[in-house]
Amino acid sequence: MAKTATATEIKIRPLHDKIIVRRDEAEDRTAAGIYLPEKAKDTPKTGVVEAVGTGNLNTETGKLIPLSVKKGDRVIFSSYAGSEVKLGDEKLLIMSEEEVLAVID
């Protein structure tokens, strides 16, 4: 039987202004305690930054402009932000820093 790789075994490095985000888990019940079926769960629009790229290149000066988010930041992003990739058993989002709406302090 073939062994499947987990995300910890696979190294992924975003390029330029891209970041990798692990989406938060969907709520499985409401505030009132009612359990939600799988189809009723809303996909979370928050997550944790797992990796960041090196930044954008300023075409006029040739210098690198670093990203304002860093690994470990909790961020809010729009519903359709990024591209979902599956690494092993995990689903991660690769998105531009521009798609991040806010950082949660």
Image: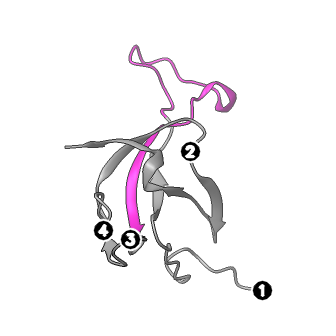
The residue singled out by tag 3 in the image is 60
- Residue at mark 4 to residue at mark 1: CA–CA distance: 40 Å
Q: Separation of disc 1 and disc 3 at Cα? A: 50 Å
Q: Position of residue 41 (x, y in %)?
A: 59, 29
Please tell me which residue is depicted at 58% across the width and 51% down the height of the picture. Answer: 82
Q: Which residue is mark 1?
A: 2
Instruction: Specify which label sits upstream in the sequence, 1 or 2.
Output: 1
Tell me which label, 1 or 3, sits earlier in the chain.
1
Q: Residues within 10 Å of mark 4 (few under 14, many from 20)?
A: some
Give the CA separation, mark 3 to mark 4: 15 Å
Q: Using residue 27 as the reference point, say whether residue 67 is left or right of it.
A: left
Q: Which residues are magenta?
A: 27-52
Where is residue 48, by image quadrant?
A: bottom left
Q: Secondary structure at mark 3?
A: loop
Q: Nearer the viewer, residue 25 or 96?
A: 96
Tell me how the rendering is colored.
Answer: one colour
What residue appears at the point 56 percent right and 44 percent down from the top-left corner?
Answer: 81
Provide residue 88's location: percent of width, then percent of height: 64, 72
Mark 4 = which residue?
A: 66
Q: Give the vertical position of 104 relative to 58 (above or below).
A: above
**Residue type, label 2:** Ala
- Measured Cα–Cα span from mark 4 to mark 2: 21 Å
